[in-house]
Image (spheres, helix red, strand yellow):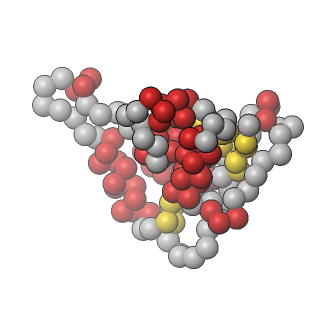
Amino acid sequence: MIVIDAKDSVLGRIASKAAKLALGGEKVEIVNAEKAMIFGDPKVTAKKYKTRIDLTVKGNPSYAPKFPRTPDRIVRRAVRGMLPFRTQKGREAFRRVMCHVGIPEKLKSEKAVELEDAKKSRGKKFISIGDLSTMLGAKW
């Protein structure tokens, strides 16, 4: 089992590393999901995610696509986007990935790995996943 600390790291880079490890057969736990970053203008990013959540169909809204609001689910959905989810291998790999807000009690004794190439490197404009979730109306 590999524990990845997402604090001050870029969401896409964490997601790609976690997806690669899960496809290799490793169980991946991502902690501090609310502290991961998305680079770009915060207003544009929030608007993009809000638009995705507000999608509905004309007939029955229960058939509309569902997109997450909470930080751990946003990170897990990003990992899912890096996997071949429509194949059996991709679905099995997705089951091996878990995301957590903060550090749960069962993982406090484990050593968390910080991915150096996933750390924020440049750019002034960014938004954390926790702030994005609050803007989307999540109560976590």
Residue furthest to the right in view is 109
Q: Position of residue 116 (x, y in %)?
A: 70, 64
Q: Residue at x 42, y 41 (%)?
A: 84
Q: Is residue 15 above or below residue 76?
A: below
Q: Is residue 28 left or right of residue 46?
A: right
Q: Which of 115 and 107 lies nearest the eye of the viewer? A: 115
Q: Which of 57 and 20 lies nearest the eye of the viewer? A: 20
Residue furthest to the left in view is 58
Q: Is residue 70 visible?
A: no
Q: Is residue 18 above or below residue 107?
A: below
Q: Residue at x 62, y 45 (%)?
A: 21
Q: Position of residue 3 (x, y in %)?
A: 73, 43
Q: Position of residue 85 (x, y in %)?
A: 42, 36
Q: Position of residue 121 (x, y in %)?
A: 61, 73
Q: Is residue 4 left or right of residue 19?
A: right
Q: Is residue 18 left or right of residue 106?
A: left
The quarter in which the C terminus is drawn is top right
Q: Residue at x 63, y 36 (%)?
A: 25
The quarter in which the N terminus is drawn is top right
- The quadrant holding residue 11 is bottom right
